[in-house]
Image (spheres, rainbow, N blue to C red):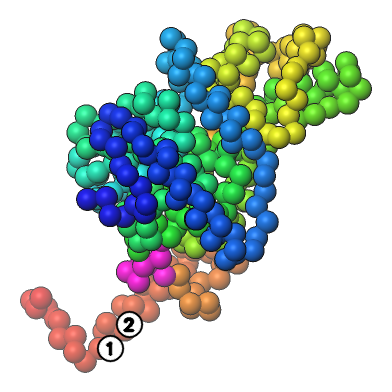
Amino acid sequence: MMSFITHLTIPKFGGIGNATRCLACAFLSTTSVTKARTGETIMNVFDRRAKRLHRDRTTAMSDYKVYEYLKEEFGYRLSDRVLDIKREFNHLVDLGCGRGYVSKHLLKDSVKQIYQCEFSEKMLIQSEVSSEVPTQRIVVDEEHLPFKDNSLDIVVSSLSLHWVNDLPGCFKQVHNALKQDGVFLGCLFGGDTLYELRVALQLAEQEIEGGLSAHVSPFTSVQDLGNLLNRAGFTMLTIDIDEMVVTYPSIRELMYDLKGMAESNCAWSRKTHLKRKVIEAADVIYKDMYSNDQGVPATFQVIYFIGWKPHPSQQKPAQRGSGQISFKDLGNLDEITKKIDLESMKTDDSDPNNDKGPGKS
């Protein structure tokens, strides 16, 4: 049943078993082959071990569900987009599934089998599953996918890929694992996420310490995301942006919630400690620049994307020069339409095979 996964012993539902150990062996061979084949320099921006620890620590919190509001909301929205695709998928992979924010909402009419993939084993144990669709849990790092080529029907990912160092490599591996006409659907935080917090911390640190450092993780832009998906081989791309503004009493509640979400900064260039004076100054600046009647707003920009693996049955763009109407004539569209209709009527009247007349049909 699991022949599309290479070198991986799948645990029974509800447990993790030896998946981590088996994947470690697979990762060593996969990584070396990939680097040797491409010869590309992979950016190493994020400390992936630190990010795993962030997620592991939230599993020990008794009230971790209190901080799930963002991931629950956008996970539900992404699952709704999956259900909008009028097709039945045999194998779906929820990449970076967290606690099952997407896959737990999926229905048997759309998916036959779900594989939840998460690189934090402790968080994966807490993942919720669909009540209708059989689900397997697998410990998988998004940067090293263990799936065979042309084996999956759909891959989804919600608010996880913004912590991946080798995003081009991840997209390419997803493309290779998908069958022809397979679909890659996901969302990740965009560049304007937490811009208020970024500005407040930078101004405060510059005022207190005379310099600044990165306290908010760098995020991708719409243009960069589209280029990366095209480069990986995906076609018929659709990318759109959604925003959610959450209001907090102060900067402290915002930072505490980010910690509870396991969304604290894990860039290598981050400072390990933030001085109390800097936080207090940032709180004042934040309120002075952005506060409203309810508190301080925090913007979360989310970029949705969908891309398809090429297949001969997919629609192709028209050949260059085949258009009959110029963009400069769009202002006279009504006249052009009437002219085309008249020419069509004249063509029908002059057609000798058209023997329609009074009383004929």
Number of residue marks: 2
Q: Position of residue 179 (x, y in %)?
A: 34, 60
Which residue occupies the extreme right position in the image?
210
Q: Nearer the viewer, residue 98 or 336?
A: 98
SS at badge 1: helix
Residue 177 showing in the rendered view: yes
Q: CA distance from mark 1 to mark 2?
A: 6 Å
Q: Return the x and y of residue 295 as percentages of the image width and height.
A: 63, 9
Disc 1 crowd rating (10 Å Cα; few below 14, some 14-19, many 20+) is few
> Is residue 306 visible in this depiction of the protein?
no
User: In front: 191, or 67?
Assistant: 67
Q: Position of residue 226 (x, y in %)?
A: 56, 53
Q: Residue at x 71, y 17 (%)?
A: 290
Q: Is residue 46 above or below residue 57?
A: below
Magenta part of the chain: 308-316
Q: Is residue 128 above or below residue 347?
A: above
**Residue at x 46%, y 14% (from the top left corner):** 60
Q: Position of residue 138 (x, y in %)?
A: 36, 39
Tell whether position 313 is magenta: yes
Does the magenta stretch mainly form a helix, a strand or a loop? Answer: loop
Quadrant of the rendering where the C terminus is positioned: bottom left
The answer to whether marks 1 and 2 mark residues whose Cβ atoms lie closer than 8 Å is yes
The disc placed on residue 350 is: 1
Rendering quarter of residue 296? top right
Q: Residues within 10 Å of mark 2 (few under 14, many from 20)?
A: few
Give the residue at mark 2. Answer: 346
Amino acid type, label 1: Ser
- Magenta stretch containing residue 206, yes or no? no
Q: Quadrant of residue 32?
A: bottom right
Looking at the rendered structure, the kind of residue marked 2 is: Lys
